[in-house]
Image (spheres, coloured by chain):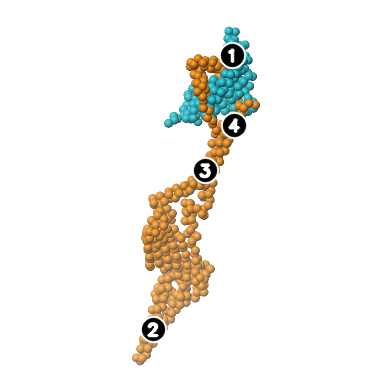
Amino acid sequence: MASPPNTSTETFDALYRDCARDMYAYVHTLLGDDASAEDVTALAFERAYRRRATFDDRRGSRRGWLFGIARNAALDELRRRKRSAPILGELPDETTRAPEEEADLAVRRTTVRVALAALAPRERELVALKFHGGLSNAEIAAVLGTSESNAGTRVHRAVSKLREACNAPS
Amino acid sequence: MRHRDPLTDVQRDELDALDRALAGEPVQLEMRELEELVRDVRAGAPEMSPAFAARLEHELQEGFPTSQERVPVSVRRPWADWSGRRWVLLPATGSLAAVVVALVVVFGGTNDTGTFADQASRDADTPSSALTEEASPAAGAADSAGGAGTGGSAGGAADRAAAAPAPSAKSGGATSIAPVPPDPSPGAIAPARTRKVERSAVLALSTPDDDFERTTDAVIATVGRFGGIVASSQIGASDAMGGEASFDLRIPTERLDRALAALSKLGHVTERNQSLQDITANFASAQERLSDARAERRGLLRALARATTQNQIASIKAQLRNVSSRIAGAKGELSSLRRRADLSRVDLTVRGNGEGESGTSGGGSWTPGDAAGDALRVLEVLAGIALVALAVLAPLGLVVAAVVLAVRSGRRRRRESALDPT
């Protein structure tokens, strides 16, 4: 028998502290700019707070539920703007900030960011859900509304493309 | 539709290694590349600015109050708070409409449906609609007989009472009847100045089977209470038909109206008729014949006193016997007419209506059995309402569900399209 939903403020506070930074990273990856990412992250938490009584743990984890709300808010924002996330537009210049002895590391990480930006939006979202959100395949499936097997296949495909892009000769 | 994408063993191993790397656990040597990838991707993860982190923390402490500052992002509308729950209103609205329709269907068709309220309404209406106060054709003839009375009247108060219902036959000239002065000598024959009216009534009652015997007993008790008599009665009880009883009643005319009202309360009135018959002419004629016979007898008695021969005496005695016989006949006729005027005839029929419960009985006290019957009727009506509501609600609910699913599916497709390359 499923336990009754825990709607206490303490529970939500713990969820917030566990997910806030990961969710911001995920939303930022989708939207591509700080201002929108901040607004959508705050909006997602606000919606989740208002709807916390409707959460049903039989339908998935709280983390997956929260990322689902954030995803809807981010997609609504993307649709409103009628454009995809220009992730390259705000890429920080890592090489200028990295020490000399970490030049190789900085170059590699820049390569990864460029490869990530080159992915299709759906694949980039999967990478963000997996790497930034830290969601399991089951949680990703719940967020995307698909099966766990399908979510695993899509995650594997996206990661493979990312690896290929990173290893491709420049 | 969700696709089944079975993972290969290699894919499964790589995903397991990825999950271990994400969890900070060691992975196989050949998968070390994944560890580096996880580190590099996470190292490039966008991070909150300290200012935004502080603002978000503050909003958390405030319980995330609705902020209009984010309007450009969320495309807020006045009903934004209901954005996730608007669809809930659709079935609710549909249900409300269905209930309203059901109520209209059930209570609107008052003539054809057997609802509790309708039954009560019919019960209330039936007595008045069935009550047909019939003015006898003889009442019309009362005009001609009204002032023709020349004989004596021994009716006294009974005569005045018999004249009382005459106003119902106003067109018959009843209002022209003068009040009758008290008769100082009841035995004397006075001129019949008032009309003699014979009243009769037919009354039919239906009653629940449970109340049949109680109703017939109540009929007898009511007749006795108004000084009437049961001339004859026939009571038959049948399980199949619910029983039927016929009563031939005689009710004092001056109490007839009140007695009929009391009898009508003993059951559901299915028929009620009243009629009037003017017998003033018959009464006056009998009085005249009696007066003439008595005058003739007085003359014969005087002649008998003057008779001198046996033949004369025998002849006068024979005439006296004849006159005495006519006097007796006239007296008997007057007595019969007086009874007809003083006592009204009521033909009363009581029938069981075949119902086991006495829920709709109009007579008697309200018993627990009546309450159970009422409760059953209410439940029947409610069940009818529920059935009609379901008949309306089911297709409506399907339509609403289809609309909700279509709306949600369309919204989901539109959202997903945001990730499509432009």
Mark toward the viewer: 3 or 1: 1
Residue B81, image quadrant:
top right
Total count of labels: 4
Residue at (62%, 23%) from the top-left corner?
Answer: A85
Residue A144: tell me if it is visible. yes
Query: Closer to the N terminus: mark 3 or mark 4?
Result: 3
Given the current orientation, which residue lies at the most extreme top position?
A: A101
Q: Quadrant of the C terminus of chain B?
A: top right
**How far apart are labels 3 and 4 at the CA level?**
28 Å
The chain assigned the colour orange in the figure is B
CB under 8 Å between discs 1 and 2: no
Secondary structure under the numbered disc 4 in the rendered image: helix
Secondary structure under the numbered disc 3 in the rendered image: helix
Q: Chain of mark 2?
A: B
**How far apart are labels 3 and 1 at the CA level?**
62 Å
CB under 8 Å between discs 2 and 3: no
Residue at (56%, 36%) from the top-left corner?
Answer: B405
**How far apart are labels 2 and 3 at the CA level?**
94 Å
Q: Chain of mark 1?
A: A
**Label 1: which residue?**
A108
Label drawn at residue B394: 3
Residue B307: tell me if it is visible. no
Q: Color of chain A here? A: cyan
**Label 4: which residue?**
B413
